[in-house]
Structure formats: structure tokens, C-alpha cells
Amino acid sequence: MELFDLFFYIFAAIIVVAGAVTVLNKNLIYSAFALLILLSGVAVMFFLLGAEFLAMVQILIYVGGIMILVVFGIMLTGQIKSVPVRENFLYLLIASVVSGLLCGLLVTGITSRPAQFLTSVVESTSLRSLGNLLIGKYYLIFGILGVLLLVILIAAAGMARNNRE
């Protein structure tokens, strides 16, 4: 077993445990921090697999931006303690069966293909050309998304302020 394999399995285990804590924990703050660990683990996986750009995008957008919005949303709403969490064994059983079937279908689909179909050549794109494309062609979309996130944050702060009064 090489060092790469060891790191891969360690971070895969961290991602799975953090995902379970995110879903199963009743405290929203702990779930948000577990989601932070999960998203950071995914960024490390991207880095380990050679996709450094995706790792940085994962850190900047998801870990940085989305998690800040989630934590602000949790902190600004004062009614977190009064939200009842309903547990129903039937729904848990149905979700487990469907998840197991989908995982089995995925594993069967991957392992039933010959290896020659799984290998493909991916054309490499330089970061410079990708950056020029994002800043040139898609500049307006990124600007609109930034303004939208700002409006959502201001609206959440306004709603939390109105609930306290």
C-alpha cells in the first residue's frame, strides 16, 4: 500500500463519518461543522486525485461561501431550539433500502463493464485558458451570482431582525 492509497482511504473515511454526523446529528451547529469537515475532505480528495483547480473551487465556493451562509442562517434565526425533529422508523427503513439498492446498482454498473470502456482520454485545459473563459465569457453570470448571494444575506439579516422585534 502506497502513501497515496493510505491518504485516500483516511480521507474517504473522514468524509463518510462527517456525512453521517451531518445527517444524523440533531444539533444544527454540529451538523454545520460536520458539513464543513465533509466539504473540506472532498477538497482534499480533489487535490489527491490531481484536480487542484476543483480543490480550490471547492474550498472557495463551498467551504468559504456556502458554509458562511449556512452558519449565518443558523445563527440569525433564533427559533432553532423550537424546531421539532420527527423520527419515523418506516421512513428510515425506506431510505435505507432505496440507498442500498442505488449503491448496488452503481457497483454492478461499474464492475460489469470491461476495463477498456472505463479508460478514456480527457483533454487537458490550462488554468490560464479556463480563467480567461470565466472572466471573459461568463463574467456577467459571476457578477449576478455575487449580487444574489449578497441580497440573500441582507434578507436573512432583515428577517432575523424583524423576528426579534
Image (cartoon, helix red, strand yellow):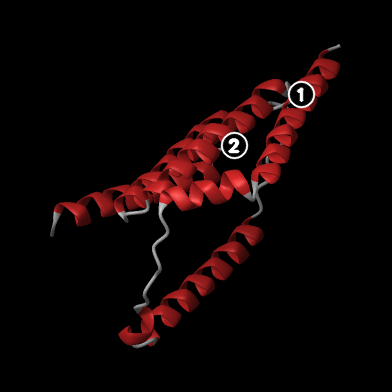
- Which residue is nearer to you in this view: 31 or 155? 155
Percent position (x, y) of residue 113?
39, 86
* Residue 161 placement: quadrant: top right
| Residue type, label 2 | Ile
| Residue 116 placement: quadrant | bottom left
Secondary structure at badge 2 equals helix
Residue appearing at x 72%, y 28% in the figure: 150
Q: Residue furthest top?
A: 165
Q: Is residue 36 left or right of residue 72?
A: left
Q: How many marks?
A: 2
Residue bearing the label numbered 1 = 154
Q: Which residue is mark 2?
A: 66
The quadrant the C terminus occupies is top right
The answer, for residue 121, to whether it is visible in the render is yes
**N-terminal of the two: label 1 or label 2?**
2
**Residue 93 higher or lower than 163, as above or below:** below
- Indicate whether 130 appears above or below 84: below
Q: Is residue 42 visible?
A: no
Q: Which residue is rendered at x = 37% and y = 79% of the image?
A: 118
- Pointer 1 local density, CA inside 10 Å: few below 14, some 14–19, many at least 20: few
Q: Position of residue 107 (x, y in %)?
A: 42, 76
